[in-house]
Amino acid sequence: MATPTEIQSTVENEPKGVGARLAGSNTLWTGLVLVALCVLFSAIRPDAFPTLFNVQTLLVQAAPLLMLAVGMTFVIITSGIDLSVGSVLVFAGVVSAQTMEALSGGDSTHAGWGVIAAGLVVSLLGGAAWGLLNGILVAVARVPALIVTLGSFGAALGAAQLLTNGIDVRTVPAVLRTTLGTGTSFGVVPNLVILAVVITLLAGWLLHTTAFGRHTYAIGSNAEAARRSGIRVTRHLVAVYALTGVLAGLAGFMSLAYFGTTTISGHSNDNLNAIAAVVLGGTSLFGGIGTVLGSVIGVFIPAVLDTGFVMAGVRPFWQPIAVGAVLVAAVWMDQRRRRARNSR
């Protein structure tokens, strides 16, 4: 059993509400940076950046990455890491596309919603399988998360390449592309963005209002104290990594719908982009602090920089440099905040 001091420490370190969590992170500053970037690029290219088409494009391109970032938020709050999400996305997209092909006799271009539903289920299950494997190795076998997910990063991508011989699957159902991939609702809002918003809101509800979310914060603050206070830490960590895998599987299906192909070689940096988005949004790499809203804001900083640099005529190679500088600054601010809190 936990001592009164340990239990009290766990409770005190756990953020009490969304407002307190936002105040205890870099989310506000990151939001101001995002607003400043949007204003800057709008002033430089008022004819191109603040247009409806550009906003729609930014939102659609960020939707799959947002799913990865939401899952990564849960993992990093527990003081973990998942380097495999980009490869799991690719693997999920491959098994989904191949399932739809198999059910359609080799060409799923004209497949209906029954086949598409099967493809979605397989994509989610494929992501969940990798997430479950990661969680078991991290929580049960006690292998460091960095090593486990680095191994899964290579294994999932290798499995996808073995299944396809390195050749992208291109026979994606046309109805999937025209509805979810490129379709809009009310003539303005992309359907892909609506799906991402719904999932993000559900994840925010799960993290910020339920016992599952409270346990996630408690484990990230002090795993041993959480265990002694009655939280099933091992089972919870397995569930968190499985959830991250499911969201990566969903991201793979969304990418498949948007691009109309599996894009095996197109997601090599997605894992790092997801981590950067979460950290930029104020989630602490040391665990116990973070919000879904912050991760949403963090996702759009690299996207805005990339689009803005292109429109402003700046070489796109500056984009990763700018993101890296902001990321280092965010971690530095997080370290200062932790030192200040610990010195009280």
Image: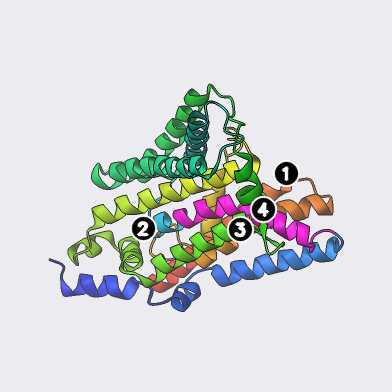
- Read off the residue under disc 2: 78
- Read off the residue under disc 4: 183
Q: At which x and y percent is residue 193?
A: 61, 58
Q: Residue at image x 42%, y 46%?
A: 245
Distance, label 4 to label 1, CA atoms, is 32 Å
Callout 4: SS: loop
Q: Earlier in the sequence, mark 1 or mark 3?
A: 3
Taking the view exactly as shown, the residue that stands out farthest to the left is: 1
Q: Quadrant of the C terminus?
A: bottom left
Taking the view exactly as shown, the residue that stands out farthest to the right is: 47
Q: Earlier in the sequence, mark 2 or mark 3?
A: 2
Q: Residue at image x 25%, y 57%?
A: 233
Q: Which mark is residue 145?
A: none
Marks 4,1: beta carbons within 8 A: no
Q: At which x and y percent is residue 15?
A: 38, 73
Callout 2: SS: loop
Distance, label 1 to label 3, CA atoms, is 27 Å
Q: Residue at image x 52%, y 31%?
A: 104
Q: At which x and y percent is residue 35?
A: 69, 69
Q: Residue at image x 41%, y 70%?
A: 208
Q: In the rendered view, does 63 fall on the left or right side of 119?
A: right
Q: Earlier in the sequence, mark 2 or mark 4?
A: 2
Distance, label 2 to label 4, CA atoms, is 37 Å
Q: How many marks?
A: 4
